[in-house]
Image (tube, helix red, strand yellow):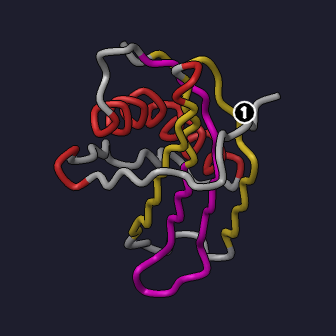
Amino acid sequence: MIELKGYKVNRLEIENRAKPGTQLKLQNQLKYNVNYMDDNKTCVGRLELRIMDADLNPFEMKIEMVAEFTYGEEDEKPDIHTGSFDQLFPFVRQIVNTAASFTGMPGLLIPIMKLNKDTVRVNNNPKGGEQSPLN
């Protein structure tokens, strides 16, 4: 069973110089990686999200987050990858919505995103164990 233990935002950048009333065509770029600490059944998810205007209007938001998860003996890494993302993403959506409201942009709610576990690549980390970024 995958369980979110905690998360933090490492970086949040917002630029909103679009003229009031400008219709934005927002697009997202998302990157999500998971580093495993198999010896204690913990992993760290690192998420990077960039939201920008497709027509190059001066609006952009960047978020970098990390989260720590625990998982069970029976959990396989592709399932951990997608399950951890599914638990973290609602917090990302809320942060985007709240941060956008500080710039005067009402109701920016990004669509729900799901990862396909069949496309997840699992690589072993040759550098050894990962330390939790939450400490």
Quarter of the image for the C terminus: give it: top right
The three-letter amino acid code for the residue at tag 1 is Ser
Name the residue nearer the viewer: 101 or 39: 39
Quarter of the image for the N terminus: give it: top left
Q: Is residue 79 above or below residue 33?
A: above
Q: Is residue 23 above or below residue 132?
A: below
Q: Which residue is mark 1?
A: 132
Residue displayed at 61% across by 33% down: 67
Residue bounds of the magenta highlight = 47-71
Quick check: is 115 in the magenta stretch? no
Q: Position of residue 79 (x, y in %)?
A: 28, 32
Residue displayed at 75% across by 47% down: 10
Q: Position of residue 73 (x, y in %)?
A: 37, 15
Residue displayed at 60% across by 28% down: 68
Name the residue nearer the viewer: 103 or 14: 14
Q: Position of residue 8 (x, y in %)?
A: 71, 35
Q: Say how many tags the image has.
A: 1
